[in-house]
Image (spheres, grey):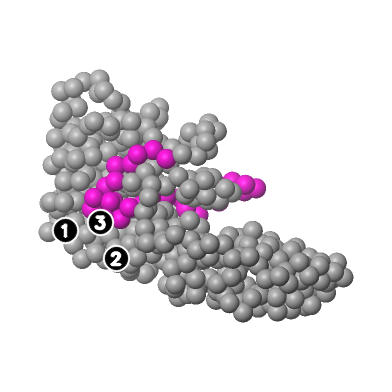
Protein backbone atom coordinates (compact mmCIF):
# COMPACT_ATOMS: atom_id res chain seq x y z
CA UNK A 1 0.00 0.00 0.00
CA UNK A 2 1.24 3.47 -0.90
CA UNK A 3 0.32 6.45 1.26
CA UNK A 4 1.93 9.78 0.41
CA UNK A 5 1.21 13.31 1.62
CA UNK A 6 2.96 16.07 -0.36
CA UNK A 7 2.99 19.64 0.96
CA UNK A 8 4.15 22.16 -1.65
CA UNK A 9 5.07 25.76 -0.81
CA UNK A 10 4.34 26.90 -4.38
CA UNK A 11 5.42 26.05 -7.93
CA UNK A 12 3.00 23.14 -8.05
CA UNK A 13 2.70 23.41 -11.86
CA UNK A 14 6.28 24.47 -12.59
CA UNK A 15 9.19 22.49 -14.07
CA UNK A 16 10.62 22.21 -10.55
CA UNK A 17 7.86 19.85 -9.44
CA UNK A 18 7.66 17.60 -12.52
CA UNK A 19 9.96 14.94 -11.08
CA UNK A 20 8.33 14.84 -7.60
CA UNK A 21 4.88 14.49 -9.24
CA UNK A 22 6.14 11.73 -11.54
CA UNK A 23 7.71 9.85 -8.66
CA UNK A 24 4.43 9.88 -6.71
CA UNK A 25 2.46 8.68 -9.74
CA UNK A 26 5.01 5.93 -10.35
CA UNK A 27 4.40 4.63 -6.85
CA UNK A 28 0.63 4.68 -7.36
CA UNK A 29 0.80 2.81 -10.68
CA UNK A 30 -0.51 3.51 -14.19
CA UNK A 31 -4.15 2.82 -13.32
CA UNK A 32 -4.34 5.35 -10.49
CA UNK A 33 -7.20 7.84 -10.82
CA UNK A 34 -6.10 11.45 -10.38
CA UNK A 35 -8.35 14.42 -9.62
CA UNK A 36 -7.92 18.15 -9.19
CA UNK A 37 -10.16 19.83 -6.59
CA UNK A 38 -10.88 23.42 -7.67
CA UNK A 39 -12.37 24.82 -4.45
CA UNK A 40 -9.50 27.13 -3.34
CA UNK A 41 -9.84 29.28 -6.47
CA UNK A 42 -13.54 28.61 -7.05
CA UNK A 43 -14.44 32.26 -6.40
CA UNK A 44 -12.22 33.54 -9.21
CA UNK A 45 -13.75 34.55 -12.55
CA UNK A 46 -11.04 32.61 -14.40
CA UNK A 47 -11.52 29.38 -12.45
CA UNK A 48 -12.16 27.35 -15.62
CA UNK A 49 -8.97 28.68 -17.18
CA UNK A 50 -6.93 27.81 -14.09
CA UNK A 51 -8.27 24.26 -14.16
CA UNK A 52 -7.49 23.84 -17.85
CA UNK A 53 -3.92 25.12 -17.39
CA UNK A 54 -3.30 22.72 -14.51
CA UNK A 55 -4.70 19.79 -16.49
CA UNK A 56 -2.49 20.74 -19.45
CA UNK A 57 0.57 20.82 -17.19
CA UNK A 58 -0.07 17.36 -15.78
CA UNK A 59 -0.88 15.97 -19.21
CA UNK A 60 2.08 17.44 -21.10
CA UNK A 61 4.79 17.79 -18.45
CA UNK A 62 4.02 15.03 -15.96
CA UNK A 63 2.41 12.60 -18.37
CA UNK A 64 -0.84 12.00 -16.48
CA UNK A 65 -4.46 12.82 -17.14
CA UNK A 66 -6.14 14.57 -14.22
CA UNK A 67 -9.91 14.89 -13.88
CA UNK A 68 -11.47 18.05 -12.48
CA UNK A 69 -13.68 17.78 -9.41
CA UNK A 70 -15.74 20.96 -9.32
CA UNK A 71 -16.82 22.23 -5.92
CA UNK A 72 -16.86 26.03 -6.01
CA UNK A 73 -19.55 27.08 -3.57
CA UNK A 74 -21.47 25.91 -0.56
CA UNK A 75 -24.19 24.93 -0.58
CA UNK A 76 -23.78 23.56 -4.12
CA UNK A 77 -26.14 24.95 -6.75
CA UNK A 78 -26.97 21.48 -8.08
CA UNK A 79 -27.06 18.82 -5.30
CA UNK A 80 -27.22 15.92 -7.76
CA UNK A 81 -24.22 17.11 -9.76
CA UNK A 82 -22.38 17.78 -6.53
CA UNK A 83 -23.00 14.23 -5.32
CA UNK A 84 -21.44 12.94 -8.55
CA UNK A 85 -18.40 15.17 -8.01
CA UNK A 86 -17.94 13.96 -4.45
CA UNK A 87 -18.19 10.35 -5.61
CA UNK A 88 -15.35 11.01 -8.06
CA UNK A 89 -13.31 12.55 -5.25
CA UNK A 90 -13.82 9.57 -2.97
CA UNK A 91 -12.85 7.16 -5.75
CA UNK A 92 -9.62 8.97 -6.61
CA UNK A 93 -6.18 7.61 -5.80
CA UNK A 94 -4.42 11.00 -6.11
CA UNK A 95 -6.03 14.26 -4.99
CA UNK A 96 -4.56 17.66 -5.83
CA UNK A 97 -5.52 21.21 -4.81
CA UNK A 98 -3.54 24.40 -5.15
CA UNK A 99 -3.65 28.19 -5.16
CA UNK A 100 -6.49 30.48 -4.17
CA UNK A 101 -7.82 31.40 -0.74
CA UNK A 102 -7.48 29.03 2.23
CA UNK A 103 -10.39 30.62 4.09
CA UNK A 104 -12.66 30.31 1.03
CA UNK A 105 -11.69 26.65 0.64
CA UNK A 106 -12.39 25.94 4.31
CA UNK A 107 -15.78 27.63 4.16
CA UNK A 108 -16.65 25.67 1.03
CA UNK A 109 -15.56 22.34 2.49
CA UNK A 110 -17.15 22.82 5.93
CA UNK A 111 -19.65 20.03 6.55
CA UNK A 112 -18.92 18.44 3.17
CA UNK A 113 -17.47 15.07 2.18
CA UNK A 114 -14.06 16.60 1.37
CA UNK A 115 -12.28 16.29 4.77
CA UNK A 116 -13.33 12.66 5.24
CA UNK A 117 -12.31 11.84 1.67
CA UNK A 118 -8.82 13.24 2.26
CA UNK A 119 -8.43 11.41 5.58
CA UNK A 120 -9.64 8.17 3.99
CA UNK A 121 -7.23 8.47 1.09
CA UNK A 122 -4.23 8.76 3.40
CA UNK A 123 -5.52 6.02 5.69
CA UNK A 124 -6.50 3.44 3.08
CA UNK A 125 -3.91 4.12 0.37
CA UNK A 126 -3.28 6.83 -2.19
CA UNK A 127 -1.81 10.30 -2.28
CA UNK A 128 -2.81 13.86 -1.40
CA UNK A 129 -0.80 16.72 -2.93
CA UNK A 130 -1.77 20.15 -1.63
CA UNK A 131 0.04 23.34 -2.57
CA UNK A 132 -0.03 27.03 -1.71
CA UNK A 133 -3.47 28.00 -0.37
CA UNK A 134 -4.59 24.38 -0.15
CA UNK A 135 -1.43 23.49 1.80
CA UNK A 136 -2.43 26.04 4.45
CA UNK A 137 -5.58 24.04 5.18
CA UNK A 138 -3.67 20.83 6.00
CA UNK A 139 -2.61 21.91 9.47
CA UNK A 140 -4.23 22.11 12.86
CA UNK A 141 -4.89 25.80 12.21
CA UNK A 142 -4.80 28.01 9.11
CA UNK A 143 -3.87 31.63 8.38
CA UNK A 144 -6.61 33.64 6.63
CA UNK A 145 -4.02 35.20 4.34
CA UNK A 146 -6.11 37.63 2.31
CA UNK A 147 -8.09 38.85 5.30
CA UNK A 148 -4.93 39.75 7.20
CA UNK A 149 -2.60 40.90 4.43
CA UNK A 150 -5.07 42.54 2.04
CA UNK A 151 -7.99 43.56 4.25
CA UNK A 152 -6.04 44.48 7.37
CA UNK A 153 -7.68 42.21 9.91
CA UNK A 154 -5.70 41.34 13.02
CA UNK A 155 -3.50 38.24 12.70
CA UNK A 156 -5.49 35.20 13.76
CA UNK A 157 -5.90 31.50 13.06
CA UNK A 158 -8.80 29.59 11.57
CA UNK A 159 -9.42 25.94 12.37
CA UNK A 160 -7.66 23.80 9.75
CA UNK A 161 -8.56 20.37 8.39
CA UNK A 162 -5.71 18.79 10.42
CA UNK A 163 -5.05 16.31 7.61
CA UNK A 164 -1.37 16.39 8.54
CA UNK A 165 -2.11 15.72 12.20
CA UNK A 166 -4.42 12.80 11.59
CA UNK A 167 -1.97 11.23 9.15
CA UNK A 168 1.25 11.78 11.12
CA UNK A 169 0.42 12.93 14.64
CA UNK A 170 2.17 16.28 14.03
CA UNK A 171 0.41 19.23 15.67
CA UNK A 172 1.45 21.89 13.21
CA UNK A 173 0.30 24.97 11.35
CA UNK A 174 1.42 24.64 7.73
CA UNK A 175 2.74 27.89 6.21
CA UNK A 176 3.69 27.78 2.50
CA UNK A 177 5.39 30.63 0.61
CA UNK A 178 7.77 30.71 3.58
CA UNK A 179 10.51 32.66 1.81
CA UNK A 180 8.25 34.97 -0.22
CA UNK A 181 10.03 38.19 -1.18
CA UNK A 182 7.41 39.99 -3.27
CA UNK A 183 7.13 42.85 -0.78
CA UNK A 184 10.41 44.42 -1.82
CA UNK A 185 10.55 47.16 0.80
CA UNK A 186 8.44 45.29 3.35
CA UNK A 187 8.55 41.80 4.82
CA UNK A 188 6.30 39.30 3.02
CA UNK A 189 7.94 36.12 4.22
CA UNK A 190 5.81 33.47 5.90
CA UNK A 191 2.96 33.62 3.36
CA UNK A 192 2.84 37.44 3.30
CA UNK A 193 2.64 37.73 7.09
CA UNK A 194 6.17 38.93 7.84
CA UNK A 195 8.06 38.46 11.08
CA UNK A 196 5.93 40.82 13.16
CA UNK A 197 2.62 39.14 12.32
CA UNK A 198 4.09 35.65 12.54
CA UNK A 199 5.25 36.31 16.11
CA UNK A 200 1.72 37.43 17.00
CA UNK A 201 0.34 34.26 15.43
CA UNK A 202 2.85 32.08 17.27
CA UNK A 203 1.61 33.47 20.56
CA UNK A 204 -1.90 32.35 19.57
CA UNK A 205 -0.97 28.81 18.56
CA UNK A 206 -2.81 25.97 20.27
CA UNK A 207 -0.90 24.30 23.07
CA UNK A 208 1.85 21.88 22.06
CA UNK A 209 1.84 22.94 18.40
CA UNK A 210 4.42 24.48 16.07
CA UNK A 211 4.82 26.04 12.63
CA UNK A 212 5.87 23.98 9.61
CA UNK A 213 7.14 26.33 6.89
CA UNK A 214 7.70 25.36 3.25
CA UNK A 215 9.61 27.62 0.87
CA UNK A 216 8.35 28.52 -2.59
CA UNK A 217 9.13 25.98 -5.32
CA UNK A 218 9.77 23.48 -2.54
CA UNK A 219 7.90 20.51 -1.16
CA UNK A 220 7.85 18.09 1.75
CA UNK A 221 6.94 14.60 0.50
CA UNK A 222 5.96 12.36 3.40
CA UNK A 223 5.87 8.58 3.01
CA UNK A 224 3.29 7.70 5.63
CA UNK A 225 4.25 4.01 5.61
CA UNK A 226 7.95 4.47 6.35
CA UNK A 227 7.75 7.84 8.12
CA UNK A 228 10.40 9.30 5.79
CA UNK A 229 9.97 12.93 4.71
CA UNK A 230 11.94 14.20 1.71
CA UNK A 231 12.50 17.88 0.95
CA UNK A 232 12.25 18.42 -2.81
CA UNK A 233 12.61 21.44 -5.07
CA UNK A 234 14.75 24.54 -4.59
CA UNK A 235 14.45 25.75 -1.01
CA UNK A 236 14.02 24.58 2.56
CA UNK A 237 11.46 23.26 5.01
CA UNK A 238 11.45 24.88 8.44
CA UNK A 239 10.20 23.68 11.84
CA UNK A 240 9.68 26.79 13.96
CA UNK A 241 8.79 27.02 17.65
CA UNK A 242 8.42 30.56 18.99
CA UNK A 243 11.16 31.96 16.80
CA UNK A 244 13.54 28.99 17.00
CA UNK A 245 13.97 27.41 13.57
CA UNK A 246 15.24 24.05 12.40
CA UNK A 247 15.97 24.34 8.67
CA UNK A 248 16.15 21.35 6.30
CA UNK A 249 17.43 22.03 2.75
CA UNK A 250 16.23 20.44 -0.48
CA UNK A 251 17.70 17.03 -1.11
CA UNK A 252 17.61 15.99 2.54
CA UNK A 253 15.42 13.17 3.85
CA UNK A 254 14.35 13.35 7.47
CA UNK A 255 11.73 11.51 9.49
CA UNK A 256 8.36 12.46 10.86
CA UNK A 257 9.78 11.70 14.30
CA UNK A 258 12.59 14.21 13.76
CA UNK A 259 10.04 16.86 12.83
CA UNK A 260 8.06 15.98 15.93
CA UNK A 261 11.20 16.11 18.08
CA UNK A 262 12.11 19.61 16.89
CA UNK A 263 8.52 20.75 17.34
CA UNK A 264 8.23 19.09 20.71
CA UNK A 265 9.97 21.87 22.62
CA UNK A 266 6.59 23.59 22.82
CA UNK A 267 5.08 20.51 24.41
CA UNK A 268 7.97 19.66 26.72
CA UNK A 269 8.76 23.17 27.91
CA UNK A 270 9.06 23.29 31.67
CA UNK A 271 8.01 26.31 33.72
CA UNK A 272 10.66 29.01 33.51
CA UNK A 273 12.82 29.43 36.57
CA UNK A 274 12.55 32.62 38.51
CA UNK A 275 14.34 35.46 36.76
CA UNK A 276 17.91 36.04 37.87
CA UNK A 277 19.04 39.63 38.18
CA UNK A 278 22.05 40.62 36.07
CA UNK A 279 25.34 40.93 37.92
CA UNK A 280 25.74 44.02 40.05
CA UNK A 281 28.51 45.22 37.73
CA UNK A 282 26.10 45.75 34.81
CA UNK A 283 25.40 49.48 35.42
CA UNK A 284 29.12 50.22 35.55
CA UNK A 285 29.74 48.08 32.46
CA UNK A 286 26.97 49.91 30.62
CA UNK A 287 28.62 53.25 31.32
CA UNK A 288 32.00 52.00 30.14
CA UNK A 289 30.38 50.45 27.08
CA UNK A 290 28.68 53.73 26.17
CA UNK A 291 31.96 55.60 26.46
CA UNK A 292 33.75 53.08 24.25
CA UNK A 293 31.04 53.24 21.60
CA UNK A 294 30.95 57.02 21.62
CA UNK A 295 34.71 56.99 21.05
CA UNK A 296 34.32 54.50 18.19
CA UNK A 297 36.40 51.92 20.05
CA UNK A 298 34.54 48.78 18.98
CA UNK A 299 37.26 46.37 20.16
CA UNK A 300 37.07 47.75 23.70
CA UNK A 301 33.26 47.66 23.59
CA UNK A 302 33.24 43.99 22.64
CA UNK A 303 35.83 43.18 25.29
CA UNK A 304 33.67 44.87 27.91
CA UNK A 305 30.63 42.82 26.88
CA UNK A 306 32.54 39.55 26.83
CA UNK A 307 34.30 40.21 30.12
CA UNK A 308 31.03 41.35 31.68
CA UNK A 309 29.13 38.13 30.99
CA UNK A 310 28.57 36.16 34.19
CA UNK A 311 30.56 33.01 34.80
CA UNK A 312 27.29 31.09 35.13
CA UNK A 313 25.88 30.89 31.59
CA UNK A 314 22.39 30.35 32.95
CA UNK A 315 22.16 34.01 33.96
CA UNK A 316 22.35 35.49 30.43
CA UNK A 317 19.29 37.65 29.80
CA UNK A 318 18.02 40.46 27.58
CA UNK A 319 20.87 42.79 28.47
CA UNK A 320 23.38 40.67 26.53
CA UNK A 321 21.34 40.97 23.33
CA UNK A 322 20.76 44.69 23.80
CA UNK A 323 24.49 45.31 24.22
CA UNK A 324 25.15 43.41 21.02
CA UNK A 325 22.60 45.57 19.21
CA UNK A 326 24.26 48.77 20.47
CA UNK A 327 27.67 47.49 19.42
CA UNK A 328 26.51 46.54 15.90
CA UNK A 329 24.74 49.87 15.49
CA UNK A 330 27.97 51.69 16.37
CA UNK A 331 30.07 49.81 13.85
CA UNK A 332 30.57 51.61 10.56
CA UNK A 333 32.63 51.26 7.42
CA UNK A 334 35.22 50.07 6.79
CA UNK A 335 34.90 47.66 9.72
CA UNK A 336 33.69 44.14 8.86
CA UNK A 337 30.60 43.91 11.04
CA UNK A 338 30.38 40.13 10.92
CA UNK A 339 33.95 39.52 11.99
CA UNK A 340 33.79 42.27 14.59
CA UNK A 341 30.82 40.79 16.44
CA UNK A 342 31.65 37.13 15.79
CA UNK A 343 33.18 36.45 19.26
CA UNK A 344 30.09 37.71 21.07
CA UNK A 345 27.57 36.06 18.72
CA UNK A 346 29.30 32.69 18.94
CA UNK A 347 29.46 32.94 22.72
CA UNK A 348 25.74 33.73 22.90
CA UNK A 349 24.97 30.83 20.56
CA UNK A 350 27.01 28.52 22.78
CA UNK A 351 24.98 29.67 25.78
CA UNK A 352 21.77 29.18 23.80
CA UNK A 353 22.82 25.64 22.84
CA UNK A 354 23.47 24.86 26.50
CA UNK A 355 20.07 26.26 27.46
CA UNK A 356 18.33 24.13 24.81
CA UNK A 357 20.21 21.03 25.91
CA UNK A 358 19.01 21.65 29.47
CA UNK A 359 15.46 22.39 28.24
CA UNK A 360 15.59 25.95 29.57
CA UNK A 361 13.41 27.18 26.71
CA UNK A 362 12.81 30.63 28.22
CA UNK A 363 16.57 31.30 28.35
CA UNK A 364 17.01 29.97 24.81
CA UNK A 365 14.23 32.21 23.48
CA UNK A 366 15.62 35.24 25.32
CA UNK A 367 19.06 34.82 23.76
CA UNK A 368 17.66 34.28 20.28
CA UNK A 369 15.28 37.22 20.57
CA UNK A 370 18.16 39.42 21.68
CA UNK A 371 20.13 38.39 18.60
CA UNK A 372 17.15 39.13 16.35
CA UNK A 373 16.76 42.59 17.86
CA UNK A 374 20.47 43.11 17.24
CA UNK A 375 20.02 42.26 13.58
CA UNK A 376 21.51 38.76 13.72
CA UNK A 377 19.47 36.09 11.95
CA UNK A 378 19.94 32.61 13.44
CA UNK A 379 19.01 29.45 11.52
CA UNK A 380 19.19 25.90 12.89
CA UNK A 381 20.16 23.49 10.10
CA UNK A 382 21.01 19.78 10.01
CA UNK A 383 24.66 20.86 9.69
CA UNK A 384 24.53 23.09 12.74
CA UNK A 385 23.65 26.69 13.58
CA UNK A 386 24.16 29.33 10.91
CA UNK A 387 23.98 33.07 11.58
CA UNK A 388 24.17 36.27 9.56
CA UNK A 389 24.17 39.98 10.39
CA UNK A 390 21.19 41.45 8.57
CA UNK A 391 21.80 45.14 9.18
Instruction: Tell me whether circle 2 and circle 1 mark residues in contact (CB < 8 Å).
Output: no
Cα–Cα span, label 2 and label 1: 19 Å
Q: In the depicted view, which residue is nearer to us: 381 or 362?
A: 362
Dot 2 or dot 3, earlier in sequence: 3
Q: In the depicted view, which residue is nearer to us: 371 or 378?
A: 371
- For label 2, the residue is 257
Residue 344: x, y in percent? Answer: 65, 75
- Residue found 44% across the figure and 72% down from its top: 358
Q: Quadrant of the N terminus?
A: bottom left
- For label 1, the residue is 2
Secondary element at image label 2? helix
Secondary element at image label 3? helix
- Residue found 65% across the figure and 78% down from its top: 343
Image side of residue 221 versus residue 100, left or right: left
Label 3 crowd bin: few (<14), some (14–19), many (20+), radius 10 Å: some
Cα–Cα span, label 3 and label 1: 15 Å
Q: Is residue 368 above or below residue 357?
A: above
Write the start and end of the magenta stretch as one range.
157-186
Instruction: Tell me whether circle 2 and circle 3 mark residues in contact (CB < 8 Å).
Output: no
Residue 374: x, y in percent? Answer: 66, 62
- For label 3, the residue is 168
Image side of residue 244 versus residue 338, left or right: left
- Whether residue 386 appears in this view of the structure is no
Amino acid sequence: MTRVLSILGSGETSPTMVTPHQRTFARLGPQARAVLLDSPYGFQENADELTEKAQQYFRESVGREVEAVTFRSAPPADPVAHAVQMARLRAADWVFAGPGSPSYALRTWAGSAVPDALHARLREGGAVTFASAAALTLGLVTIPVYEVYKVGEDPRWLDGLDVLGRATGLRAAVVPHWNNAEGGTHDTRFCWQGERRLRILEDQLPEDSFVLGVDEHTGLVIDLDSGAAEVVGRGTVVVRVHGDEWVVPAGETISVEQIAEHGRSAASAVPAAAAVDPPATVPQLDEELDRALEAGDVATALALVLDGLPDDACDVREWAGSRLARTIAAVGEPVDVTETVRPLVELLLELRARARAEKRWADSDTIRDGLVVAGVEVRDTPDGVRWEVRR
